Structures are given as structure tokens and as C-alpha cells.
Image (cartoon, rainbow, N blue to C red):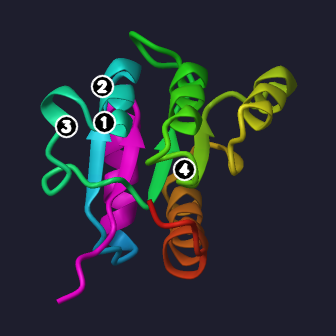
Amino acid sequence: MHQLSTVLLVEDNDDDAELIAYAFEKAGIANPLVRLADGEAAVAYARGTGVYADRDRHPVPALILLDLKLPRRSGFEVLAEVRANPSTQHTPVVVLTSSGQQPDIERAYQLCANSYLVKPVNRDALLDMVKALDAYWVRLNRTVSA
């Protein structure tokens, strides 16, 4: 039986995380959505260290949805760590944040983000975005195996 690839959501805002999880459910996306609420936990998950050392329970994600404004470590720091780690260096990272500021966009791409999206303000737009993310990044996109 084929195991569905994990999508890692790094989001500190509970309301945003719930909306994204709701959009995944409404879109019929069966992939496990793992949510972490701070940058330090995201780095540990990417490295497979600490409580995330068991890769059977905490597999390398097929996609990382990354907020920039996070406690403990910023999304930029998380992105740099993801790219420096051999097991996640090719994992697609989609920055999903409320900031549409050009310096943030430029910095994210300098750190090798694959995409930069500004969080939509309503559920329908978020649902459309999640469907597009699933279609492209999870179903169609091919990446280097870890």
C-alpha cells in the first residue's frame, strides 16, 4: 500500500492553521498535514532530531508550507536550515505568509524558497489556493529522493 506523503505546515497562528487544515479537508486532500507552531520545532523536524528522530513517525515531508513570522526562529532561519540539511535540501518550500513586502519576497527567494504566496483573506480563496498547491506541489511535481 502506498503511503501518502506528509505536508508540513509551519504556522504559529492557530486560526490560520485551522483554516488551512479546513481547506485541506474540504479539498479532499488525504495527505497527512503535520502542523508545527514555532521555528525551533520546524528545524528539529527537518533535521530529524529530538522528538522527531523517528522518521517512520515523522517522515521527511513532500512539501513544507512555511510562515515567516514565527516564534523561536523566523521562517527565514527555518528555510536556511531546510536548505542546509541534506535530507530536506530539495524539499519544496512554499512560503505562505501575510507579508507581501518586497524585501521579504526577495529574501525568501535568495534562501531558495520554491514559491511565495500571500495568505488569502477569505475561505474560498484559501480553498482555491490549497487545491492548486495540492495539484502542483504534491501530485504533479517531482523532486529528488532523500
Q: Residue at x 84, y 30 (%)?
A: 106
The label nearer to you, 4 versus 1, is 1
Residue type at mark 4: give it: Asn
Q: Residues within 10 Å of mark 4 (few under 14, many from 20)?
A: few
What residue is shown with label 3? Answer: 52
Residue type at mark 2: give it: Ala
Query: Contact (CB < 8 A) between labels 3 and 1?
Result: yes
Query: Contact (CB < 8 A) between labels 4 and 1?
Result: no
What residue is shown with label 1? Answer: 45
- At mark 4, the secondary structure is loop
User: Label 3 to label 1, Cα distance in Å?
Assistant: 5 Å
Give residue 42's position: percent from left, percent from top.
Answer: 36, 31
Q: Quadrant of the C terminus?
A: bottom left
Q: In the rendered image, is residue 47 in sight? A: yes
Query: Contact (CB < 8 A) between labels 2 and 1?
Result: yes
What residue is shown with label 4? Answer: 122
Q: Nearer the viewer, residue 57 or 131?
A: 57
What residue is shown with label 2? Answer: 41
- At mark 3, the secondary structure is helix
Is residue 14 shown above or below 135? above
Q: Residues within 10 Å of mark 3 (few under 14, many from 20)?
A: some
Give residue 93's position: percent from left, percent from top.
Answer: 57, 48
- At mark 1, the secondary structure is helix
Q: Residue at x 47, y 57 (%)?
A: 63
User: Label 2 to label 3, Cα distance in Å?
Assistant: 9 Å
Which comes sooner in the sequence, label 4 or label 3?
3
User: Label 2 to label 1, Cα distance in Å?
Assistant: 6 Å
The segment highlighted magenta reads 1-25
Q: Residues within 10 Å of mark 1 (few under 14, many from 20)?
A: many
